[in-house]
Image: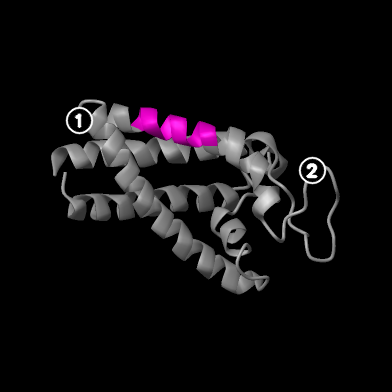
Amino acid sequence: MSGLSILVWGFGATILLTTLLAGSQGAGLTRMNLPFMIGTIFTPNRDKAKLIGFGIHLLNGWIFAFIYAVFLQAMGGPTWWRGMIIGFAHSAFLLMALMSLLPAVHPRMASEKRGPTATQRLEPPGFLGLHYGYQTPLTVLLAHLLYGAVLGFFLGRF
């Protein structure tokens, strides 16, 4: 696996993941918009937040592609199913731990213990992101399984 192939396939896998999550939101399966949530950490401007969040999400996707590559090598080499195992672990950690912690670090997100304020108006995702819809965990899991499968498959080939 070369750094260039990790960058190329990390970009492709991130675009796929982001497209699936956006499509899930558009189809009414979830109300979660991850680039928007990330972007509003940095700006209160809702339009700019989407652009900033998308850029940061893309960078995160590349960073995670390198992390996946390290784990894939440690697991015996890249395969689509090993990538899916890592994707499952990634999404489980995201849904069970990070979603619940997000209000503690997000300056514009209300917490579950106290309601919204003038500056903290975003709804917290809650455990498994269930505050954004009961199908949110499924969409996040599916997107991360496919992210891992793409990386595992293509990093093993090129």
Q: Find numbered disc 2 in the image and state the secondary structure of the residue it sits on.
A: loop
* Nearest the eye: 47 or 92: 92
Left-right relation of 33 to 87: right
Region rendered in magenta: 84-93
Left-right relation of 133 to 98: right
Find residue 84 and report its image quarter.
top left
Give me the residue at 70% from left, 40% from top: 126
Find residue 136 and report its image quarter.
top right
* Viewport quadrant of the C terminus: top left
Q: Can residue 79 be seen by looking at this rendering?
A: no
Q: Position of residue 146 (x, y in %)?
A: 38, 38
Q: Find numbered disc 1 in the image and state the secondary structure of the residue it sits on.
A: loop
Give me the residue at 86% from left, 51% from top: 115
What main secondary structure does the magenta stretch of the protein show?
A: helix
Mark 2 or mark 1, earlier in chain: 1
Give me the residue at 68% from left, 70% from top: 44
Residue situated furthest left in the rendering:
158
Residue receiving disc 1: 77
Q: Position of residue 123 (x, y in %)?
A: 74, 51
Residue receiving disc 2: 112
Instruction: Say few, some or many: other residues with alpha carbon within 10 Å of mark 1 (under 14 / 14 to 19 / 20 or more).
Output: some
Find residue 11 and report its image quarter.
bottom left
What is the distance, in whole Å, between disc 2 and disc 1 at their CAs?
42 Å
Q: Is residue 131 above or below residue 42?
A: above
Q: Is residue 69 above or below residue 19?
A: above
Q: Is residue 88 above or below residue 59?
A: above
Give me the residue at 45% from left, 30% from top: 89
Q: Is residue 138 magenta?
A: no
Instruction: Say few, some or many: other residues with alpha carbon within 10 Å of mark 2 (under 14 / 14 to 19 / 20 or more).
Output: some
Disc marking residue 125: none
